[in-house]
Image (cartoon, rainbow, N blue to C red):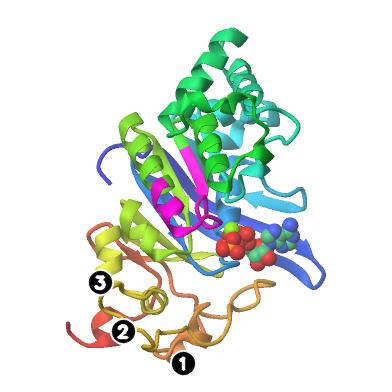
Amino acid sequence: MTGKPFVTVEGLSIDFDVPGGALHAVRNISFDIARGETLCIVGESGSGKSMTALGLMGLLPSNAHRAARRLKVGEHDLLGLNRRQMSDLMGSEMAMIFQEPMTSLNPCYTVGNQMAETLVRHRDVTWRSALATARDWLERVGIPPTAGRLDQYPHQLSGGLRQRVMIAMMLMCEPKLIIADEPTTALDVTIQAQILHLLAGLQRELGITMIFITHDLGVVSRIADRIAVMYAGQIVEIGGTRDVLTDSQHPYTRGLLDCVPAPGKTRPGAHLGTIPGTVPSLIGGLDGCGFAGRCSHAAPACRTGIPALTDRGNERQVRCLFTPETLWGAA
Ligand code: ATP
Ligand code: MG
């Protein structure tokens, strides 16, 4: 990465005390994001994507333990902030968009009320001007002002509209970092495409840095500058979108890509790849490579030592003992 990163995550670990020991949801992960860049975090269910995001934002469940060497967003050292300072930062500097907008929308207040309330809390503005800004923002996210949306309650809106309201409410405070956790997964594909287009457009226009979490690699190819692939709480591959998608170097990344149907290439009824087996238990330490039990290339050495995430050039890092040439032969 050229220049100073806007987001720095260094040595982030998140554990839960569960019956049977400590569940390691996130194991010592590190990544940087440049200003205005979109990093997509992908991986199977349970790989630690949401916990990474919530850990960065300081929004973890109360039974979680977080440790990190460094967590920085812009000039803010997040590890040095107390709960109140962190909550001031949320909404003004950084915002989170969830899969289910009702997580953030209050069913008891009208859309206009909660949008204005958010703005008044984070900016020095009057209620009247906050309402006017809310109306403008609804228009920007494609909700016409004529529809009287400001006076409606969240339950009166469709899922797609609710997600637009949520996006408007977050962007209206002009955050510099957005973390979107599966924001379109619950929507049908056409609405999903519209919301992605909207979010990516506004993000570019406003120069916002984004962490976008998804398990949908089709979405990734459309919006990510870089991709981090997570498996069992670790990053197993990270690099530029094109590099990772067209020249993946970790068997898990390859496995994920083989599971995706390619429009125009995959014939109806054709066999799609699957990754056999399941994610190892997250309770306790890993004995070797977390993916070894499911990897058709695994060798004895993969089960005895945890491979380090190593540089492969071109800002790519991969956690595998083997090179692509050894795994798949020369291209
Ligand atoms: P998904 O794609 O399903 O959203 P994810 O990659 O976001 O998955 P996380 O929500 O980050 O997964 O969870 C990582 C691990 O942490 C999972 O194994 C999960 O069971 C565990 N976990 C999450 N919340 C808790 C909790 N409150 N107590 C104990 N374990 C938890
Ligand atoms: Mg999740």
Q: Label 2's element?
A: loop
Q: Which mark is residue 196?
A: none
Is residue 193 highlighted in magenta?
A: yes
Say whether disc 3 or disc 1 marks the residue closer to the N-terminus.
3
Q: Nearer the viewer, residue 154 or 58?
A: 154
Q: Label 3's element?
A: loop
Q: What residue would you read off at disc 2?
A: 267
| Of labels 2 and 1, the one closer to you | 2
Q: Quadrant of residue 155?
A: top right
Please give the name of the residue rendered at 50% of the width and 24% of the height, measured from the top-left corner. 146
Q: Nearer the viewer, residue 69 or 93?
A: 93
Q: Which mark is residue 300?
A: 1
Say whether disc 2 or disc 1 marks the residue closer to the N-terminus.
2
Asked if residue 173 shows in the view, the reply is no
Q: Nearer the viewer, residue 182 or 165?
A: 165
How much space separates mark 3 and mark 1, taking CA atoms? 25 Å
Say whether disc 2 or disc 3 marks the residue closer to the N-terminus.
3
The quadrant where ligand 1 appears is: bottom right
Q: How dense is the environment of label 2, judged by Cα within 10 Å: few (below 14), some, or many (20 and up)?
A: few
Q: Nearer the viewer, residue 1 or 147?
A: 147
The magenta stretch is: 178-194
| Of labels 2 and 3, the one closer to you | 2
